[in-house]
Image: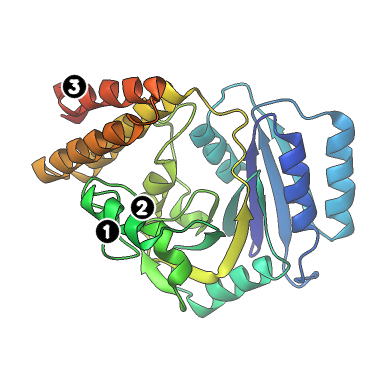
Amino acid sequence: MQGLSVVICTRNRVQDLTRCIHSITKQDIGRTSPIEVIIIDDGDIPKEILSEFEALLTACGYSFIYHSKTDRGLWLSRIKAVELSTMDKILFLDDDVEIPGHYLSTLIQTYLDYPNCAGVGGIAIGMSNSFLGTIRCLLSFQQSLSSGKLSLSGQAGSMYNWHKARKIFKTEFQHGCNMSFKKEAIKDLGPVPWLKSYSVGEDILMSRIAQKSGPLYINPELKLLHHESPASRDNLEDVAYTRVLNHVYLLKDKKSGPIGYLALVWTTLYLILREQPKKNVAAIKGYKKGLKEIFSRQTAG
């Protein structure tokens, strides 16, 4: 069916999720396009809260789907969302975001303006780099000179300059808190062994899969507030380790070659040095552990 599925993957962040749902109910789109809201839950949302969500959404003319699963993980939640969606376009929102009133109507219009695209993404307000921050990210291979490109080490730091954009531009990746695709472009998602728990880079992989069906775009009019709640995240050592490990797999998937892996070594060394003055022992330990994986034949191949 032509329309939009708004998907929120969540786990034990009811307060954040409630704020997100309320922002969805304040859209200016009216009933001009079919909208369904899908919550994929890795936690436990009280029944009375779910009833409140359903009442709010149905009053706006939106249908509501709730799915609770025991096989935890963000990537698996994305897969389940695609299975449950009945619409031809799927928008993924983090549970700790708020969207402005024009968001859904602007997104749908962008798809009408770019009918051959495979996906459209947006920008998180406040996600930006200073001039010196940009220089550091460029020198440490966390960022590309092009807004729509990944860095040599496969990092998505270029999104920190997206706030400067004044018009729609092509991209090879989207930001996971704020990304959408045509269902046809991501219909064949399947389990990925290295995407578990805190799924660093899953938005990059999904964008890469979608790109096989057509171009991706970022519309700077699609700005939202991302509160970046720390709740339910893994410990710092695991996050740091996963940040390196998953980019090893992303480079392997891209068949990057030696340059990509060498760039990732440089990026990881920079991240270790960055944490030294803060004496962030857990993060340093995780990055060092990840550094070993870059040289692992079994991992990098």
Q: Residues within 10 Å of mark 3 (few under 14, many from 20)?
A: few
* Numbered circle sitting on residue 144: 1
Q: Indicate the secondary structure of the residue bearing disc 3.
A: helix
- Identity of the residue furthest to the left in this view: 258
Quarter that holds the N terminus: bottom right
Is tag 3's residue or tag 2's residue first in the polypeptide sequence? 2
* Numbered circle sitting on residue 33: none
Instruction: Provide residue 175's location: percent of width, then percent of height.
Output: 47, 53
Q: Residues within 10 Å of mark 1 (few under 14, many from 20)?
A: many
Question: In percent of the image, x 50 and y 48: which residue is there?
Answer: 176
Q: Nearer the viewer, residue 224 or 41?
A: 224
Is tag 3's residue or tag 1's residue first in the polypeptide sequence? 1
Q: Which residue is mark 3?
A: 298
Residue 217 location, quadrant: bottom left
Quarter that holds the C terminus: top left
Residue 275 relative to residue 107: left or right: left
Q: Which residue is mark 2?
A: 157
Amino acid carrying label 1: it is Ser
Instruction: Provide residue 245's location: percent of width, then percent of height.
Output: 30, 29
Amino acid carrying label 3: it is Gln
